[in-house]
Amino acid sequence: KGIANSTGEYLAFLDSDDEILDGAIPQLLQAIERNNDNIIVCRMFRNKEELIPWTDKFQEGNEYSAYNMINSGFLHGTACGCLIKRALIVDNGLHFPVGVYNGEDGFFFHSCLYYAGAVKFKDIAMYNVKGAADSLSRSYSKERIIRMISSLEVVENVADNYQVFNDRLFILDYIKYSMLSGLVADTLHTKGIGLYYLSKQKGIKSIKL
């Protein structure tokens, strides 16, 4: 609903218990005036510790392809900490998929990356995660596993309707692989649930990689 009602040229996303750091948006607006980038990734922190660091992999101001980004091992599994051009989102009908309870923001970011094809990095401290590291995302239960399986099915259905860019299809596979690997890891942490249970679930058998 926020995307549908937005009017700006670029969009930034903020979780309810986090904050955008003072001065970040003005600095970014000045940077945007000099280019026409689709996605600008900034710097994120939690308690002064950097999250998803990139300065050791990428140079500020250079454009990097989606392949370079993913192949380098840079895992940006969130829609936060960056600016995304609104036209890229709206013109391609991108949205946070309804029915995805774990990984919806990572899916959204990589969907934007799929259509943009490249990103730029800006050395601006933009985002601070205020929530505890041991959050809802680490509450293991059978219900969570069931929701994650359902989320994978939703993501596959949504991605199957994306415009086909043959040189970027690996991004869609990467999204599903990331979610599936997270599901396996969480299954191993959940009492009373094992990989045998997971292998028998209909939703898992239908996933195409």
Image (cartoon, rainbow, N blue to C red):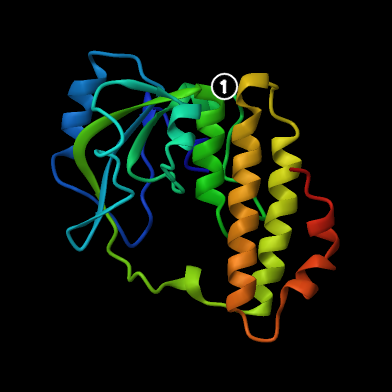
Q: Residue at x 44, y 45 (%)?
A: 75
Q: As drawn, is 133 to the left or to the right of 27?
A: right
Kind of residue at badge 1:
Asp
Q: Residue at x 72, y 49 (%)?
A: 154
Q: As drawn, is 124 to the left or to the right of 62?
A: left
| Residue 118 in the image: above or below residue 43 | above
Q: Nearer the viewer, residue 168 or 131?
A: 168
**How many numbered callouts?**
1
Counting from the top left corner in percent of width and height, residue 57 is at: 31, 36
Q: Residue at x 85, y 68 (%)?
A: 200
Q: Secondary structure at mark 1?
A: helix
Residue 165 makes an appearance in the image: no
Mark 1, Cα crowd under 10 Å, few <14 / some 14-19 / many 20+, is few
Residue 21 makes an appearance in the image: yes
| Image quarter of residue 203 | bottom right
| Residue 192 in the image: above or below residue 170 | below
For the C terminus, which image quadrant? top right
Counting from the top left corner in percent of width and height, residue 167 is at: 62, 20
Q: Which residue is mark 1?
A: 91
Q: As drawn, is 116 to the left or to the right of 92?
A: left
Counting from the top left corner in percent of width and height, residue 80 is at: 38, 46
| Residue 117 in the image: above or below residue 41 | above
| Residue 146 in the image: above or below residue 28 | below
Q: Residue at x 66, y 39 (%)?
A: 173
Q: Residue furthest left?
A: 23
Counting from the top left corner in percent of width and height, residue 38 is at: 41, 22
Q: Residue furthest bottom?
A: 192
Q: Nearer the viewer, residue 40 or 6?
A: 40
